[in-house]
Image (tube, rainbow, N blue to C red):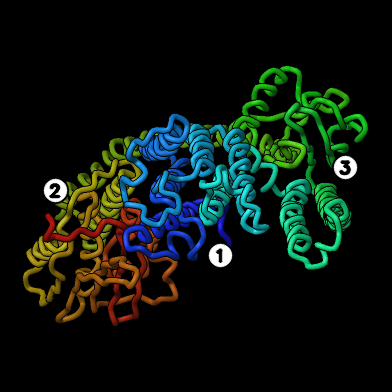
Amino acid sequence: MRLTHKQAAYLISYGIVSIGVLVLLGWAFDITVFKSLQSGLTTMKANTALTFVLFGLSLRFSDHHNSTLRHAALALVAGGLLISLLTLSEYWFGWNLGIDEYLFVDLDTAVANFPGRMSVATALSFVLTGTALVFTIYRRHLAAHVVAVLIGFLGLLVLLGYLYNVSSLYRVFAFNSMPVHAAVTLGFFSLGILHLCPDAGLSALIFNDTAGGVLVRRLIPPVIFVPIFLGAIIVFSPQAAAFDSRFNTSLLVLTNIAVLFLVLLWSASSLQTIDLERRQSDQQFRLAVEASPGAIILVNQAGKITLVNAQAETLFGYTREELLGKKVEMLVPEQFNAHHVQDRDAFFAAPTARPMGAGRDLYGRRKDGRQVPVEIGLNPIQTNEGRFVLASIIDITERKQAEAEIHKMNRELEQRVAERTAQLQVANKELKAFAYSVSHDLRAPLRSIDGFSLALLEDYADSLNDEAQNYLQRVRAASQRMAQLIDDLLALSRLTHSELRPETVDLSGMVQTIAAELQLTEPERNVTFVIAPAAAVKADVPLLRVALENLLNNAWKFTARHASACIEFGLEKRPSGETIYFVRDDGAGFDMTYIDKLFGAFQRLHTPAEFPGTGIGLATVLRIIHRHGGQIWAEGAVEHGATFYFTLPGTAVDPSSE
């Protein structure tokens, strides 16, 4: 996994702290390799190692989002700067403040004047390093990076002194020199500060993905290491002693020119490759924009159009030349121009991919002045030339027309529904009036017919022969049957208009009550009732009783011709969780061929002579079950009984919870 720049800076800070800790351990346990890498080289003093630890920890937390940790980093820097400044004051004023051997006694110092004291060059470098860290903590990245580069050059200068054996490059005084691993650690500090914030200051020039950034990153290694390598050849080559210094210098300059020229050619080739890739990418982008089925417009931060496709020309009626370089507000209706400028500025201030004007109707202005309904998606694009917004625009004229047509149809439908509702209300009023008329105007004549027929039979029985009395009996039966039919019709009518009042119903108990009432009407019959226990639902109690009475009355009626009969009420559970209730008998049954007529009003599958009735009962049951949102169906066979199934969706109740 590739490290990010910030992770690299943290790793460098850990390395710096580790170097300081190892040197302190070297002083604590007298380990030469930790103090001076090898015998004979300058040792890193304990104060120097401690300052590296303080600065390394400060580097780790100098950019932390937690202000407390940043303040801690600042305190660590202050501690390191205090050690460095006190050391410089000792050199300047000739003091001995007792800080040089505060941690450990220096027995290895060749010159006894300043045992345990860091060199002047090291102290000055620490002052610069502390300054760079303070700039970093306070987000002054450019200043921090300039100082960091200077620190890197100082460290490199000391390393060159050791490499070329030029003591004046790492010694300030004859007795005062910077150790080699201190110079290396200063170089790490320079890299750490540059990596810590790669998007600001000098780092933004070095670590960006532009051609310039690539060029800088490719040139830095040869610019630094090629002259060092060539210098080493000249310094250490036996043949170099045969020539004077001017020839050697000329040779070094010529060699540097040749190497840098080769580097320049290599960089030019790289830049050409990058430019070709950029041009190819730009061409692919333009082809993709051109091939888009919708209009595409690219706008810069100043609000000027920099790119359009053919669909944009078609949509707005302008040519490409008329659009490029113009303000995008030329495509916005005049009444929205002021708001659009504000919206555009707000988008560039917080750019995110989103639809434009969510919840609002948007319109574009064509060249001829007409306004076109549009839908716009915005996508921010960051390039080397700045920030742009890519607007994808779709003409939704046809969609708007379709929506308008749908709205029109909805209004017409609502009007029709309202008219139909009014018609139904009128019809219901007429039906109520008819029911009232049936209840009052038709019953009176029927009662008269029945009453006078009864009077004739009772008062003139001696004057009427058997045939006449039979006629009167038939008249009475017909009038009574007509009265019953009227009562059934009125009951069926009331089912449609009565309001449902759901409550918990004990179906098992209700069936037992109805069964007991039936047995009281004909106690001589041998009928067994099998009733499932604990069946409870939420339903309209009066309506559900009417439905069960009709179903059980039918079962009672159609088993009358059997010497013994069984009527069962039960329930079944489907895998889906739905409950199916049923009423089953072993009576006369019916022919499944006529199942479609079973629940129709006044539809009978048996003659009145076989079984009495008006044909309203099952129609009533059907209407009650449908009003509860359920379904009802039946199965049967002639002389093998019938079973009526029904459902009451979402109404099953656990009796134990009641």
Residue 240, picture quadrant: bottom right
Q: Looking at the rendered structure, which numbered label has been put on residue 310?
A: 3
154 sits left or right of 586 in the view: right
Relative vertical location of residue 637 with respect to residue 237 in this rendering, above or below: below
- Residue that numbered label 1 is attached to: 1
**Location of the C terminus (image quadrant):** bottom left
Which callout, 3 or 1, points at the residue further toward the start of the chain?
A: 1
Counting residues from the start of the chain, the first of labels 2 and 1 encountered is: 1
Q: Is residue 428 visible?
A: no
Q: CA distance from mark 3 to mark 2?
A: 107 Å
Dots 2, 1 in contact, CB < 8 A: no
Nearer mark to the viewer, of 3 and 1: 1
Position of the N terminus, as image quadrant, is: bottom right
3 and 1 marks in contact (CB < 8 Å): no
Q: Which residue is mark 2?
A: 459
Q: Residue at x 65, y 53 (%)?
A: 166
Mark nearer the N terminus (3 vs 2): 3
Relative to 530, is 348 above or below? above
Q: Quadrant of the rendered structure where residue 263 is? A: bottom right
Query: What amino acid does circle 3 point to?
Result: Ala
